Image (cartoon, rainbow, N blue to C red):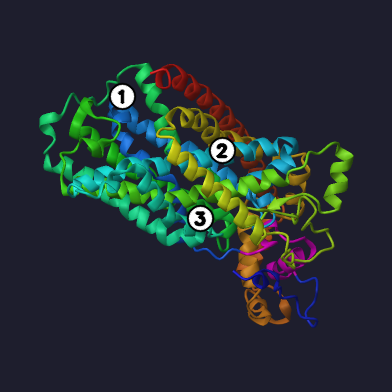
Amino acid sequence: MAASHYSTLQTTPASAPSSRPTSHSSQSRKQQQRPAHPKQAGTPGTASWLSSVINLLNTIVGAGVLAMPHALSNMGITLGTLVILWAGLTSGFGLYLQTRCARYLDRGGASFFALSQITYPNAAVIFDAAIAVKCFGVGVSYLIIIGDLMPGVVRGFGEPGEAVFLVERRFWVTAFMLIVIPLSFLRRLDSLKYTSVIALVSIAYLVVLVVYHYAAGDTLADRGEVNIIKWQGAISTLASFPVIVFAYTCHQNMFSILNELSTPTPTRTTAVVGASIGSAASIYILVAITGYLSFGSNILGNIVAQYTPSVASTIGRAAIVVLVMFSYPLQVHPCRASLDAVSKWRPQRSSGSSSKRRHSNDEFTPAASGSPSRTSSLLGGGGASPHHTNTPAKPNPEKEMSELRFAILTTAIIILSYIVAMTVSSLDKVLAYVGSTGSTAISFILPGLFYYKISAPGSAQQQRLMKDGDGDDEEEEGYEGYEGSRRSGSDEDDEGEGEGGSPTVGGAASWREAWLGGEGRGAKARGRRWRRGLLRKMSLALAVYGGVVMVVCLVVNTFFVVAH
């Protein structure tokens, strides 16, 4: 939505009494007095709701879906299904907290780095470095998967004969690298929506393949014991727990999706989270149950590898290759943004110098591209004083990463990942620890800690947000007010009013004014405070839960995965 749509406000006509008790006039005066809402400042997004869901879902669902049946075999169908739902619920809550945290920053400027700058400034570089390493490692693992699977895909369609290079992993890593290079240089996640659709089609084929073999019953001869409730013990369950938890990791791209989403109202952002997590959970449960019922306790880590060699199973392996190929750019995007933030980070020596930097616009807030900017309503760059109107902040040329810097960082990521993929055949041990720390941090710990700190009743950020009149219920009304202000003032003045500008008896305006006054307003205020307090406690609980998950995953990886 264009920025001008948010700044176009209709005022009360001069001929009308300024003190008339209408909801429209009071709302207009309230909007004129308060500064711009953080989401309405900065660069507006243009991505549709559907493209946001597609990109987030593609980030969530990867090749790990094929390991779900094996995880279910260790837990039993009942416990395994509950764990899949629980993992989706906690990951979805982390995403929801990210949408809440984004309210405290300029629109188009939300990122982990921006939040850490106003919550834990001196730890910002650690957070982004961990995200960069995690995304880089996952991207390299995708290239390794391509190199491992493509020779088998070629043999599945026939022997290569004299073209022996077709069964060389390095050839395929190089070939597919040439395909993903142009995609990695796209600035916006929204530009990857079409490749994400292709990746989701590959996932759909894999799901159909698993369901088809279960329905056909052609694996019953190889099926082992099937347990509905019985599990394989605590050790086996704990070993499978990280597989399910990390299958929902997508939080590194959530802020970019929020920055690019057009009209990011609470309803739309929450719907993006719900649709993505809900779809992923449905896919995981369907594949897990049908795959487990196909092979029982004899299921392996990759169910596609267990099917009898055929054209369908070969296409399934090719679908995995397509899936990870188009997922590689989705890892480059947050990796590049985090590296950019790390390279621009400067330590804050004291509160005095911190305040001085805030007033001199020296704090960084990543823009829609994920690169740091110097405009933020809380950090000073786009801040509005109480005397400011709703005019959005003008785009700052420094807000986006320069073309040269963008090209250098992207090229460095691509070259380094290519070198590692060509020289290393397995990153399982490294990724086991990177996933245990990085994925857990960005999924649970950071969203929980950031929201708990930034939403504290006594914090400057919370006071600024409440001063702007952006309560839990009022934020959605604010967006509707900005949209409604584009209409004709005379049309709005006629609603619920009779002659002389007085409210019509029984009109919506009079009922609204009656409710907003007295006990109604007090009840709504108490309800908002109670919900905010509960959400803060739940965010802290999520951070603690993330710490427990990290410890469990590190113990499992150390004693049961890496050791063997």
Q: Which of 246 and 418 is in front in this view?
A: 418
Amino acid type for the residue under numbered disc 3: Ser
Q: Name the secondary structure under disc 2.
A: helix
Residue 307, compared with residue 541, is above or below; it is below
Q: Name the secondary structure under disc 3.
A: helix
Whichever of callouts 3 and 2 sits on the residue coming sooner in the sequence is: 2
**Cα distance, mark 3 to mark 2?**
17 Å
Q: Nearer the viewer, residue 173 or 126?
A: 173
Give the residue pinned by disc 2.
133
Whichever of callouts 1 and 3 sits on the residue coming sooner in the sequence is: 1
Whichever of callouts 2 and 1 sits on the residue coming sooner in the sequence is: 1
Give the residue pinned by disc 3.
184
* Residue 408 placement (x, y as % from top left): 62, 53
Q: Give the range drawn in magenta.
A: 21-44
Q: Nearer the viewer, mark 1 or mark 3?
A: 3
Amino acid type for the residue under numbered disc 1: Asn
* Residue 139 placement (x, y as % from top left): 47, 43
Q: Which of 1 and 55 is in front in this view?
A: 55
Q: Is residue 25 magenta?
A: yes
At x 29%, y 51%, the residue is: 204
Local packing at callout 3 (Cα closer than 10 Å; few below 14, some 14-19, many 20+) is: many
Quarter of the view holding residue 509: bottom right
Q: Does the magenta stretch include residue 257?
A: no
**Cα distance, mark 2 to mark 1?**
30 Å
Q: Which of marks 2 and 1 is in front?
A: 2
